[in-house]
Amino acid sequence: MRTKKLTNTFLGVALLIFQSCAETTVVAEDTVTTQKSASALKTTSSFNVPVAGNSFITVKPSGASEVITSTKLGNWTNSNTVISTYFKVGNTGALHIGLKASVPSGTSTVKVTIGNTSKNVTLTGSAYTDYSVGDFTISSPGYVKVDLQGVTKTGGYFADVTDLTFSGAASTGTNIYSNDPSYYYWARRGPSCHLNYTVPTTNNVSYYYNEVTVPVGEDKIGSYFMANGFSAGYFGMQVNSATERRILFSVWSPFETDDPNNVPPDHKIILNRAGTGVTVGEFGNEGSGGQSYYKYNWTAGQTYKFLLKGEPDGSGKTDFTAWFLSPDTTTWKLIASWKRPQTSTYLKSFYSFVENFNPENGYQGRKAEFKNQWARTSDGNWIAISGAKFSVDNTYNAQQRIDAMGGNEWQCFLFTKWRIL
């Protein structure tokens, strides 16, 4: 969240868009920070794009075994599989593409495609070798999508590929791609983006209210549409698989660790109560704490309502309670109420975000509309929220992926993520 922020006012409605890598030719420059990636600062005329941080299996037939590992594209055996690599160029013109690849046995022919232009290259030899593919024409600066597909092979599989290389006139501007191994996982997930709401009061706030609509077709697997974020946790809805969706409410422990087993007993989140059918437990990896979720097949195109309460209990702890309302009922559904020890606070830091938690789906787009935000003070006054700041995460700040933008549309706050050529 430590990022440059774009501020817009809006009238009770917020629209967050989380678009796919392959839907446009440019990235809005008004959200790009001045920090340059290491790749952008290179003085050489050729750039190596690591597959491990910038590629995805975008077409994977049933039974195909291809994988993107921490170092390469491996197990490339299926000729119908498509592997897509993304990087950003700052200029137009000729772009020369190459591959760094190894073929353990035999000889392979693979097809390389940008837009409507395809070229074949022959690969052979077990030593990693830099192969020249050919020149392509880039008509607009922005993110470039390069597809690989196997054509023929005489050995067991097409190749292992560690890097895609590029050079030429189109590469003479600022070039962006993930070149830091510590960011490969996060870059493949994509930069997380947030709306940080401006609550127009200095009084204590007990409730946050928000409404979320995910347009039809924007509910990709791996999406988390977080409605009511606060200083101690988050509350929203997920797409967990092709058959499962959840309403998720989590509260962080005040003890900072990624392993819930390390949380001391007096710092553990305590369950007050949970709604019917709600699963409760602990979580880790991104902080630790108490987690509750309700399996509910929410539907794209429908509007869902989220209500969060946070108040001190008078004994040095704070109770956080979350309710969810679907359009097919008039009764609020209790998700859970958690007690956070070592904490005495009302609600702080009202925000929303859209993220992808599945790195294999990091090339796909998501979109959400967040609208009609309200806060209720501890003395009972409801206050409409009419402003927010757009922010991006450290993946963006480190210039490992910058396909995120913000703006205003139809009196709605607009936030777009992952827009690549």
Image (spheres, rainbow, N blue to C red):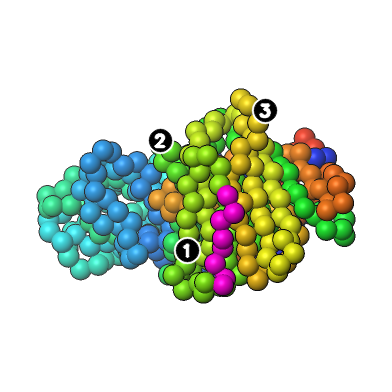
Q: Which residue is mark 2?
A: 243
- In the orientation shown, which residue stands out farthest toward the front? 315
Whether 290 is drawn above or below 414: the answer is below
Which tag, 1 or 2, sits closer to the chain's start? 2
Q: What is the secondary structure assignment of the residue under circle 2?
A: loop
Task: Give the spatial CA distance, label 1 vs label 2.
Answer: 24 Å
Whether 338 is drawn above or below 2: the answer is above
Front residue of this view, candidates 133 and 264: 264
Q: Amino acid at mark 3?
A: Thr
> Residue 26: image x %, image y %?
60, 48
Which residue is rendered at x = 87% and y = 51% of the image? Answer: 379
Which residue is rendered at x = 48% and y = 60% of the image? Answer: 283
Task: Give the spatial CA distance, label 2 vs label 3.
Answer: 26 Å
> Residue 179: image x %, image y %?
46, 68
Task: Give the spatial CA distance, label 3 vs label 1.
Answer: 34 Å
- Which span of residues is magenta-colored? 266-273
Q: What is the secondary structure assignment of the residue under circle 1?
A: loop
Is residue 151 rendered to the left or right of residue 116? left
> Residue 365: image x %, image y %?
53, 42
Which residue is rendered at x = 71% and y = 50% of the image? Answer: 309
Is residue 122 rendered to the left or right of residue 252? left
Which tag, 2 or 3, sits closer to the chain's start? 2
Rendering quarter of residue 167 = bottom left
The nearer-to-camera label among 3 and 1 is 3
The nearer-to-camera label among 1 and 2 is 1
Q: Which residue is mark 3?
A: 330
Q: Please check the rendered image and state whether residue 270 is part of the magenta-colored stretch, yes or no.
A: yes
Q: Which residue is mark 1?
A: 284
Which residue is rendered at x = 66% and y = 55% of the image? Answer: 320
